[in-house]
Amino acid sequence: MASSATITDSSAVERVFPVSEHDLSTNEGIYAYLNQYTPFFASSVIRLSGGFANWTYRAALKEPYKYIDSIGQHTVLKTIVIKFSSNATSLDASVPLDLYRTRAEVAALRLVSGLDLPHFCGIATSQTDRTQPTIFLPELVFYDTTNHVGCYVDLGNLPTLMQYLTDHPGQEAVEIATRTGRLLGEFLAGLHIWGWKVLQTESSILDLFKRSVGAKEHCAWRTIGLVEGVAKEYQIEADWEKITNTLKREVLDVEQTFNMGDFWTGNVLIEMQGPTSQVIKALYILDWELAKTGRASTDIAQFAAEAYMLRQYNTLASSSTIATSVQMKVPPVTREISSAGEALLVSFLNAYEEYIKERSSEMEKSAEGNSTQPDTMLDSRSVIGHLCAHVATIGKTFSWTDKETTDKTVRTMLQLLITNDQESTKKSLKEVLTSLKDE
């Protein structure tokens, strides 16, 4: 075991160790593991709330850990964040998850950190300039390939975007939602354009993500796979096998671009310039383990669905599913939060579409002679389908509002799924807003 004072090169984070005898789903197990196998001598370990798939912890270190960060700067860590992954979710041991996802996350962080994307500055380090609103990835400093444990630079107690918008009702939340929607919409569009261009070539750079079969199957199951059961519960009849098979095939079979795979408001941390500031300092995009090749609409729809839920779920039940099942802090939800959800949804979709359209002529030249055309990234029919499936299933299971509001929203989404399946004309993403406006 290396000394905690050892300076290591963060570009070589992957390590191979024996299988740990410790229970890594407990604070005590992680504490023992860190002190036995890693260069991090922990004085204490606490579990962090909010994770669905993995176990996440924060460890305070007995001695500062010195290392060379991703931009070659000498850095000292006094705390770290640890993520342990198993072959099932931390929320429900009966839900399997392919451990290939841990390899995909390490590869995705390494790959995406070097891309030139809108508002993006790669890996967040202590030396990074944050005078302008900038998007970052977390820095992975250690990864145990045997036990599937990753150690990250601790970003502190930053709120997720969802938490921030619900904790700051009023015009402030609306303005922040508008700005973050634009930043994230343009970032995601840039990522999708990059992935689309790579797949037009014979490059092997995305081969690992083409093989992320488990991620594709999980993404298809977590929403689309549950739609038919929800429809039966609500006694809404339709050819659900046909409707869901169409959406499943888009997740499982289409290789249009590079997908982040879990792009939602709970995987974005937001940092402001100061405690009372309304100026965004940075956004951090977490949890890339479901990264894969796929269709752009699935990333768009997941984020848009969560923004839509912020808009719709504007009352809070005293005992909500999400609060009791994962011990997440659920603050009061008001009409002002609904306005922030609307602002986030509109800003995100508009920014994404405008960014793609501004580069459409360049993309069309790249697409000459290829069957996959760039305009399919703006397929609102696909976006609406995946958005409705997300809200009807995840929005039901993890609702924070009252049952009446939840049931009304779920029924609306199921009916819109039926109508959307019968649509044959192409629409713009802005028309997604029209479809949802008065639902």
Image (cartoon, grey):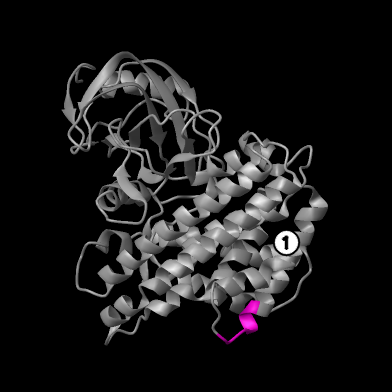
- Amino acid on which disc 1 is placed: Val
Q: Is residue 422 visible?
A: yes
- Between 328 and 187, the one nearer to me in the picture: 187
- For this view, does 110 lie left or right of residue 86? left
Q: Which residue is mark 1?
A: 410
Using the image, determine if residue 360 lies above or below residue 56.
Answer: below
- The residue carrying pointer 1 sits among few (fewer than 14), some (14 to 19) or many (20 or more) residues within 10 Å by Cα, namely many
Give the answer, above or below, for where 425 lies relative to 88: below
Quarter of the image for the C terminus: give it.
bottom right
Residue 240 percent coordinates (x, y): 65, 75
Q: Is residue 413 above or below residue 200?
A: above
Q: Write down the region rendered in magenta.
A: 420-425
Res. 239 in view: no
Residue 189 percent across, percent down from the top left: 41, 63
Left or right: residue 161 compared with residue 79: right
Mark 1 lies on a secondary structure that is: helix
